[in-house]
Image (spheres, grey):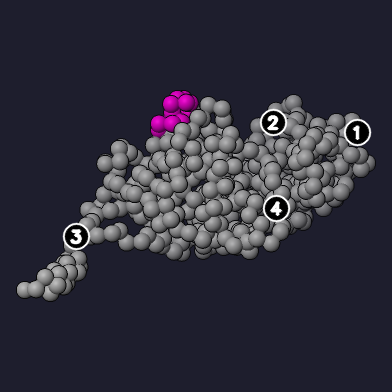
Amino acid sequence: MPCALRRVVLLAVCFATLGTLHPAATAAARYTAKPPPRSCDKYEAVYKSIDRDLELYRRNGGITPQLMAKTLSLHTAANREKGLGVAFYNGRVYVIDNGRRMKLQPFGHHVTLWTAYLRVMLDLQDRFGAHLPNVEFVWHTIDRPVRLTNASAGAQDNYPVFRFGKSAAHPDILIPNFHFYMKAYQRKFLDKIDHFNADISWAQRRPLAVARFSAYGRYVHPRDPHCQRLGAGGADICKVTGRATAICPVRQHLHEWANAKHRDRLDVSKDRFLPMDHHSRYKYLLHVDGQGLSSKLEFLLTLGSLVLKEDSGYMAYYHHLLEPGVHFLPVWKNGAGPEDILEAVDWARAHDDEAHKIALAGQALVARYLSAEARACFWLRLFAAYSDTMTYDPVEYRNITFASEAAAGTGGKGGGKEGGEGAGGEVQVAVKAAGLRFLKPAARFIEEDVAATFPRMQTELEWEP
């Protein structure tokens, strides 16, 4: 047989044989996440903040590999920032970074917050597995946003950082606060709503507005129009300390003003501790934000008392669900001082039944939309929409190499197997990715890196979904 003809025959045989090879011997099929489960459809209303936050990035050309590289470089531990790079690859969660080593000691309690969030991600891995799309992201755990949105067309210095609080002037993407998970929100608060209502009835609660807080100063951006603060009588209480920072002693001012003249309506203290469940002894609960957004609001709303919420300009991922006059009363509005707190107390005293109705509506709202299941579904929907905003599939773009857990030395720990299974049911984990010098399964990161720096954290960190 002539050589040319023999080559044609051999090539044909090779192509015919490919179809009969074991799946493990062929290139892995492209990973495609399953649609979110139907059980998450009932929380549709809470997802509206996702599209609002992502619209900026969709309008500016999406989240590109270059934008993600800059976000990792500027907003994570490698740049001495209190942020962590995280990814889902084929349904499993990893810690990622541009730097080869991650020194955790300088970040103190923020490592605790990162660990709490990583446990959330591992819970999502167990809950949803192959429903999770391939994504890369950065979360930040300081109490306030820093950068203002650049509204220029196609601006590439709006960084898609996940954060638990911001104002409308910032480009961050809102996520649930870590305190939901570290303070057992479902078990200690939502599950006890009936107890809160029965233990101290509305009629037994004192008609005072109570507030307990630390005396943190408020950090706001001097050019953020949504968060500027004035004191009583319109006094200017903020001091600009830098191009991106003004400090407003909001809580200190409230304490001094309330205790000077208004103790008949306000029980405000930065020193006298009051356990959270004892707040339900009062009909009116005053919420004032701290350095940035305070997570105390979601806890106060569970107690069945009327919440008077400072209109600080900062918002959480679920705040769009809260309607003024329906779920809470807004006070200390932007452009005015705290005097309307007194007006709110006077109104509530004169309209007792209406005040009670608002209190119960706020309680019912958080019971429905802030449950453990609702928060898990929020994360899943966020990742689905975020993935659609990315211009690249990170597994393909980084040409990620996978190996079985045993071969990769992961110890087989760290969550469900859906979405990361190879031939024979072996769990596959990423071991190498172009452009990343640090890549480790989240469970291993907690067990090795975190434990080596903070050995007591594994046993002392309280956490629940």
Does the magenta stretch mainly form a helix, a strand or a loop?
helix
Contact flag, marks 3 and 1 (Cβ < 8 Å): no
The label number, if any, that marks residue 85 in the structure image: none
Q: Residue placed at 71% from the left, 59% from the top?
A: 152
Q: Which residue is mark 2?
A: 274
Amino acid at circle 1? Lys
Whether the magenta-drawn stretch holds residue 461 is answered as: no
Q: CA distance from mark 1 to mark 2?
A: 22 Å
Dot placed on the residue nearer the N-terminal end, 3 or 1: 3
User: The residue tagged with tag 3: helix, strand or loop?
Assistant: loop
Closer to us: 150 or 51: 150
Viewer can see residue 373:
no
Q: Which residues are magenta?
A: 447-459
Q: CA distance from mark 2 to mark 4?
A: 38 Å
Dot placed on the residue nearer the N-terminal end, 2 or 4: 4
Contact flag, marks 1 and 4 (Cβ < 8 Å): no
Q: Residue placed at 18% from the left, 62% from the top?
A: 21
Viewer can see residue 83:
yes
Closer to us: 96 or 346: 96
- Tell me the quadrant of the picture where the N terminus can be found: bottom left
Dot placed on the residue nearer the N-terminal end, 1 or 4: 4
Closer to us: 431 or 434: 434
Q: Which residue is mark 1?
A: 261
* Above-or-below relation of 23 to 332: below
Q: Which residue is mark 4?
A: 149
Q: CA distance from mark 3 to mark 2?
A: 65 Å
The label number, if any, that marks residue 22 in the structure image: 3
Q: Residue placed at 51% from the left, 61% from the top?
A: 391
**Outermost residue toward the right?**
233
